[in-house]
Image: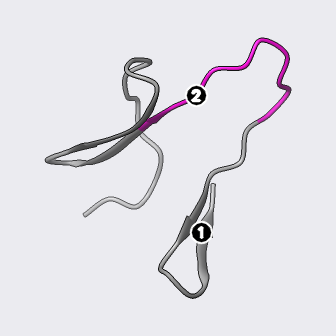
Amino acid sequence: MSAGPENGSSSPLGATPSPGGVNFSVFSRHATGVELLLFDGVEIRSGL
């Protein structure tokens, strides 16, 4: 299993599960960055 970002799809917006993982797509007209925080229910696992 890979554990890093890969190219995905820009639609639909939001989190979309797939057989190979989850595609995250967000939109902002004015953002200069985005943080993705993944939780295991108790602790922060990764900040990408």
SS class, disc 1: strand
Q: Residue at x 77, y 11 (%)?
A: 29
Q: Quadrant of the N terminus?
A: bottom left
Classed neighbour count for the residue bearing mark 2: other residues with Cα under 10 Å, few (<14), some (14–19), many (≥20):
few
**Residue at 60% of width from left, 85% of height from top?**
43
What span is colored magenta in the figure? Answer: 24-33
- Mark 2 highlights which residue? 26
CA separation in Å, label 1 and label 2? 18 Å
Q: Which amino acid type corresponds to the residue marked 2 in the rendered image?
A: Val
Report x, y in % for residue 34. Answer: 73, 39
- Sooner in the amino-acid sequence: mark 1 or mark 2: 2
Q: Amino acid at mark 1?
A: Ser
Give above or below for 28 relative to 23: above
* 36 within the magenta span: no
Up-down: is 5 above or below 45?
above
Q: For residue 17, what is the image quadrant?
A: top left
Secondary element at tag 2:
loop
Q: Position of residue 40 (x, y in %)?
A: 47, 79
- The residue that label 1 is drawn on is 46
